[in-house]
Every structure is written in C-alpha cells, then in structure tokens.
Amino acid sequence: AHRGADETSDPVARRLIELAAASLEVPDTPELRRALRVAVEVAETLVRYAFRADPSGSPELLAEARQVILRYLEPHLTR
C-alpha cells in the first residue's frame, strides 16, 4: 500500500521524531517528519557510499555524511 507524504513508515525516522520532540522540545510537525525522512534516506545513501569506498567505512566520508545531515537538519531542530 502506498503511504501518504506525511506518514512515517521508517522506524528510524519515527524514532528520530520521538527523540527530537522529547529531548529537543521540537514540535512534531509534518515539516519535521518530512525533513527527518529525507535525512534518513540521505544518511543511508552516504553511509553505503562510505562503505563502498572502504570496506571498513571511510572515516572521512562518514564524517562528511554526518556534517551533511547535521547542517540539513539544523534549521528544523533549532526553533
């Protein structure tokens, strides 16, 4: 079944939403849910890339992935 754009089926994104709402006191909004789903997808792709480049996970590429995700999410998590 096709899920609507605002539904969060990914358990990682769902957990991130719960953590953001609880620990960062960020409101659970459709925009936050979408941003976290995007962040999870981007992170998965970048982590796969880091492990393709180096079977043990390129530390440089993993650090870049972390920065990409943090910078993308920052406006959504600091209100």
Image (cartoon, rainbow, N blue to C red):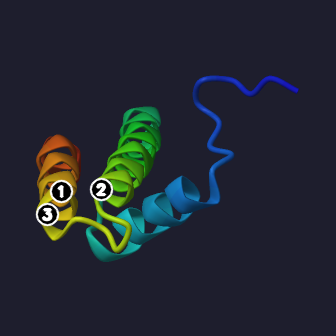
Indicate which label's residue lies in the foreground, 3 or 1.
1
Mark 2 or mark 1, earlier in chain: 2
Residue with the mark numbered 2: 50
**Residue 36 screen position, x and y as percent:** 40, 46
**Residue 73 screen position, x and y as percent:** 22, 47
Q: Amino acid at mark 3?
A: Ala
**Crowding at mark 2 (Cα within 10 Å: few <14, some 14-19, many 20+):** many
Give 43 or 16, whichever is nearer the viewer.
Answer: 43
The secondary element bearing badge 1 is classed as helix
The answer to whether marks 3 and 2 mark residues whose Cβ atoms lie closer than 8 Å is no
| 79 versus 16 height, above or below | above
The secondary element bearing badge 3 is classed as helix
The residue positioned farthest toward the right in the image shown: 1
Please report the residue visible at 36 percent of the width from the left and 50 percent of the height from the top.
43
Residue with the mark numbered 1: 61
The answer to whether marks 3 and 1 mark residues whose Cβ atoms lie closer than 8 Å is yes
Q: CA distance from mark 2 to mark 1?
A: 5 Å
Give 40 or 54, whichever is nearer the viewer.
Answer: 54
**Residue 62 screen position, x and y as percent:** 22, 62
Q: Amino acid at mark 2?
A: Ala
The disc at residue 63 is 3
- From this viewpoint, is residue 78 visible? no
Q: CA distance from mark 3 to mark 2?
A: 10 Å
**Crowding at mark 1 (Cα within 10 Å: few <14, some 14-19, many 20+):** some
Q: Amino acid at mark 1?
A: Leu
The secondary element bearing badge 2 is classed as helix
